[in-house]
Image (cartoon, grey):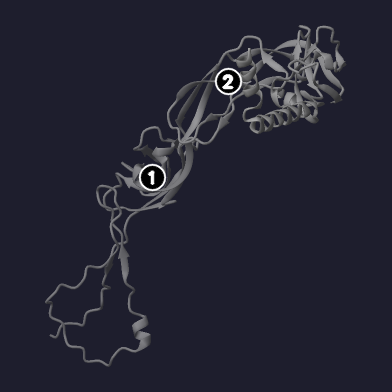
Amino acid sequence: MLRLLHEIWDLLFQNFLLKLVSLIFGIMLWSLVAHQRMITSEVTREVQLEFIRPPRDLVKISSNVHAFYINVAGPRRVLKETEFDKLTYTIDLSGAQPGKNTFKIDERQIKGLPKKEIEISSITPSEIVVEFDHRMEKRVAIRPRLHGKVEQGFEVTGILVEPPSVMLTGAARELATIEEVFTEPINLAGREHSFELSVELELPAHVTRIHPGRIGIRVTIGEKRIEREIEVPVVAKGAPEGMAIALTPPRLRLRVAGPYHALRDLDSRDIRLFVDLHGILPGRHEVVPILNIMRKQVVLVDEALPMISVLVTKPTAVAPPDRVGEDRPPHSGPNPSNAEKSLSPPVKTAVTIDPKGAQGGKKEVAPSLPRSPAPK
């Protein structure tokens, strides 16, 4: 018995000072924790809205908010442990009517908020306004939206949309004014060949497709056709030998059309314009020119070519020149005066045409001079 009492004494009073300090420290720690549990704080947090059971014959076209804010107060520990990012509030739309509908926030219906230890001091806004419109269906055309430019010298020659129209459903006030919808942008930059792709539609708000799916587009690209003017000389062919030919006008300015790359470097060597003078008689004639375009796919824009005036004349006869080496008497008279020089016969010019129709060059012929009589 004495031994038991001795052990109890040692247990209580051995290292008494150390045990007393430990007891005091434990009491202080417990008091601090208890005090922290009693300290409250206030914070503002966001609550996300969820809309359920909307009427099938109505379309929600506007809502003044998609969330609301609450001021909550409670112990710091509880506020710290609460997952405020998961707070939600559900609004049942089954009883909604066309026009504006007002729903008052009931704090008891906020999900994810501890009800016992946290108190809600305010809700902003306290009401949610949702506007509805009648639902309608409508079929509208699909128009592709093109972006960028094709390669130089090419152009878009056709666009095929499949399907060409689409059935939409949505708010009556918006769908009533829609006659067509556009696809997402189709990039044409640098393209020179036809291509196919599938795209989505760009639909207005509160409008959806009844049958979702992508739209098929085929874009046909071809070489651009252009027009340009070019000046071409008129050539005489088959002119009678020894005749002088004058063409009026000697050149024609033609307007031609064709593919871009065929006309880009077209010049007068690629176009032949001539008049056929076989069997023509001296005089003035109106002749229809003949056109020959050497490049394929290049055509004349003008309906008809203008007439070419052809003047056919015989060259003027000239006296034959003195033969070289012929004896002439020495000139014994005085030098001719300026007046006498002015009476000298003028130099005459003869124009000849080669047998192939090309105009010959001009040739100057020396004038015939009077000969002195031979001495007897």
Q: Which residue is mark 2?
A: 200
Q: Quadrant of residue 347?
A: bottom left
The answer to whether residue 47 shows anywhere in this view is yes
Give the left or right position of residue 234, taking residue 332 as reference: right
Question: The disc labelled 2 sits on which kind of residue?
Answer: Glu
Q: Secondary structure at mark 1?
A: loop
Q: Quadrant of residue 341?
A: bottom left
Give the left or right position of residue 374, taking residue 249 as reference: left
Marking on residue 129: none
Q: Residue at x 66, y 27 (%)?
A: 13
Q: Residue at x 51, y 36 (%)?
A: 149
Q: State the image coordinates of residue 305 (x, y, percent, origin top left).
A: 46, 40
Q: Quadrant of residue 153?
A: top left
Pick the residue in front: 80 or 176.
Answer: 80
Q: Which residue is mark 1?
A: 265
Distance of mark 2 from mark 1, alpha carbons?
42 Å
Q: Is residue 341 above or below residue 52?
A: below
Within-10-Å neighbours for mark 2: few <14, some 14–19, many 20+? some
Q: Quadrant of the N terminus?
A: top right
Q: Quadrant of the C terminus?
A: bottom left
Q: Is residue 152 above or below residue 116?
A: below
The answer to whether residue 125 shows anywhere in this view is no
Q: State the image coordinates of residue 162 (x, y, percent, origin top left).
A: 55, 15
Disc 2 or 1, which lies upstream in sequence?
2
Q: State the image coordinates of residue 124 (x, y, percent, origin top left).
A: 84, 27
Q: Is residue 209 above or below residue 204?
A: above
